[in-house]
Image (spheres, rainbow, N blue to C red):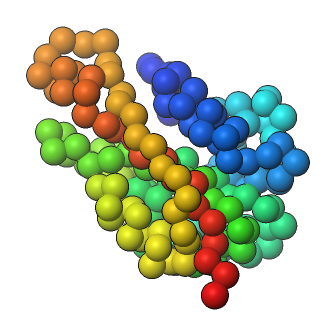
Amino acid sequence: MYEKTYPSKRFEQTLSFLQKHVSKKEPILDLGVENPFSKIMTAHGYSVENTNGEDLDVDFSSVLNSKAEVVTAFEIFEHLLAPFNVLREIRAKKLVASIPLNLWFASAYRSKTDLWDRHYHEFEDWQFDWLLEKSGWKIVESAKWTNPVKKLGIRPLLRSFTPRYYIVYAEKNLK
């Protein structure tokens, strides 16, 4: 997935946000298979288990069977047709999740060779907030950041000041 680029800024921002909200004593279920960022979390002292590559639109077994206190979901929900369903099934009380924001000057990402590497959704921040709230989560804090690229052109220029990533820390509503 990161054959040509490594998202250093995104990973640094994500780790900083995670460290602000999650103690290293709290076990984490990271939605998605093991990936470079789950390895970074482990290297920084977090206890991380990943889901097993199941289709989280229809198979919630990893989420339902997990004893983790925190669920992380970094750039996962845009790949799901119905993220509402898995969000409702999470039993952990804390969620740290990030998404790529919809960019008005770029169409949704779609790999032509990897069926899992496609975005069904690219949210605006208010849409993601609404999804979380409707699925039983209260947003405690959020942040955005840009994703500048080292290329010339109009879109690279726009990426230098248009936020691309949105991250939230949310807690389960206990009603």
Choose top left, top right, bottom left or bottom right for residue 90: bottom right
Does the rendering let one see residue 149?
yes
Q: Name above or below for residue 51 compared with residue 61.
A: above
Judging depth in this view, the residue of 5 and 3 nearest the camera is 5
Choose top left, top right, bottom left or bottom right for residue 147: top left
Q: Residue at x 40, y 40 (%)?
A: 144
Choose top left, top right, bottom left or bottom right for residue 66: bottom right
Q: Residue at x 18, y 40 (%)?
A: 106
Judging depth in this view, the residue of 115 and 66 nearest the camera is 66
Say whether residue 103 is left or right of residue 87: left
Say whether residue 152 is left or right of residue 126: left
Q: Position of residue 13 (x, y in %)?
A: 54, 31
Say whether residue 173 is left or right of residue 134: right
Q: Name above or below for residue 133 compared with residue 22.
A: below
Q: Name above or below for residue 95 compared with residue 157.
A: below
Q: Position of residue 68 (x, y in %)?
A: 80, 61
Say whether residue 33 is left or right of residue 25: left
Q: Position of residue 126 (x, y in %)?
A: 32, 61
Q: Residue at x 80, y 73 (%)?
A: 65
Quadrant housing the C terminus: bottom right
Q: Residue at x 61, y 77 (%)?
A: 173
Q: Position of residue 165 (x, y in %)?
A: 40, 41
